[in-house]
Amino acid sequence: MGKVNKKLLFDKIYSNVFSHLNKPNIDIFLCGGASTSEKKSFRDVLREELKLIDKINVLYPEELFMEILNRKHYNLLQLEDLLAENCDYIVIVSESPGSYAELGAFANNENTMKKTIVLSQTKFKNVRSFIKQGPIQHIKDYDKKHVIYYNETNKEKCIDDLLKAIRIHNRNGIIYNYNKNKKDIDLISGQYNYIMLLLYFFVDLEIIDVKNTVKEIFISKGFPSKSFEVVYQSAIRRLFSDGQICKHKENDKSKYKLSSKGYHTACSLIDSIRIDKKSYALNRIRLDIIDE
């Protein structure tokens, strides 16, 4: 298949399918302490509960950006603005020295502060401290719903308060007052969905073709080329972490394809599309791929 033709097909999938997705999911970067053999962190407890709620994507930033952090001279503080751009909310469970540092950094950055929700332990609610009177108060001044107190016995109330703060109406994932713009391929969630749609139509694609051609589309849409690598690598890492894609070899060429789970997720994306003559548009893309 020629490079130009492949780009045209990628562009058609972008314009005729991806641009019409209607999946208002909420992306949460969840920060906090790590579990040990003796004790599970409240962050991990919270993650397990939130993953059960429809329309919420729970992400650990250090996992998502691990490859970038290992390869580049970055640290999480340098990625603050990237975090803010690529999530709807940053939820910090204030339970460890590392989470205190994250809280201070995110509260001090205007872009991340507006999206930060802090869960502070109830036992410290009336304790005068720098954390309480500094970053927590700063976040509370912006939105009092963004400060939630918790302990080991009020998990259910904590989650209910969090759902209210992130505008989820109930545990069935009904979103209210949600007016976010569509997540395009300059964001991790957008590129995550776009790559899934490519693999849905093509069945499998050479890894090098996915990266190079998606980059061409990325630049052609006016997004800065310097940000592509971080977004792309993070999207691919998340796709593997979520079990949506896998690798295989064919004629000594490494390829990506959807897993069984990924195929069902892609079908759900396709179901969300709202366009006229939908079946015709989808079949037209399939025929164009076969004709190539």
Image (cartoon, grey):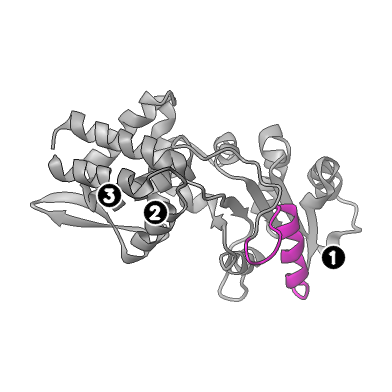
Q: Which mark is residue 66?
A: none
Camera-near label (3 vs 2) is 3
- Element under label 2? helix
Q: Nearer the viewer, residue 137 or 267?
A: 267
**What is the quadrant of the N terminus in the image?**
top left
Find out whether the residues at labels 1 and 3 contact each other: C-beta distance under 8 Å.
Answer: no
Q: Say if the magenta span includes residue 160.
A: yes
Identify residue type, mark 1: Lys
Is 43 on the left or on the right of 184, as rendered?
right
Residue positioned most to the left: 251
Give the residue at x 23% y 39%. 209
Q: Name the residue under label 3.
A: 201
Q: How crowded is mark 2: few (under 14 residues within 10 Å), some or many (20 or more)?
A: many
- Element under label 3? helix
Is residue 291 something one can see in this rendering? yes
Q: Name the residue under label 1.
A: 123
Marks 2 and 1, how far apart in space? 39 Å
Which numbered disc, 3 or 2, marks the residue that appears first in the sequence? 3
Q: Mark 2 points at which residue?
A: 239
Identify residue type, mark 3: Phe
Give the residue at x 60% y 65%. 53
Is 239 on the left or on the right of 35, as rendered?
left
Q: Where is residue 253 in the image (x, y as percent from the top left)?
A: 13, 48
- Element under label 1? helix
Which numbered disc, 1 or 3, marks the residue that appears first in the sequence? 1
Identify residue type, mark 2: Leu
Q: Where is residue 58 in the image (x, y as percent from the top left)?
A: 56, 57
Which numbered disc, 2 or 1, marks the residue that appears first in the sequence? 1
Q: Give the range drawn in magenta.
A: 151-173
Q: Which of 275 and 118 is in front in this view?
A: 275
Give the residue at x 62% y 45%. 88
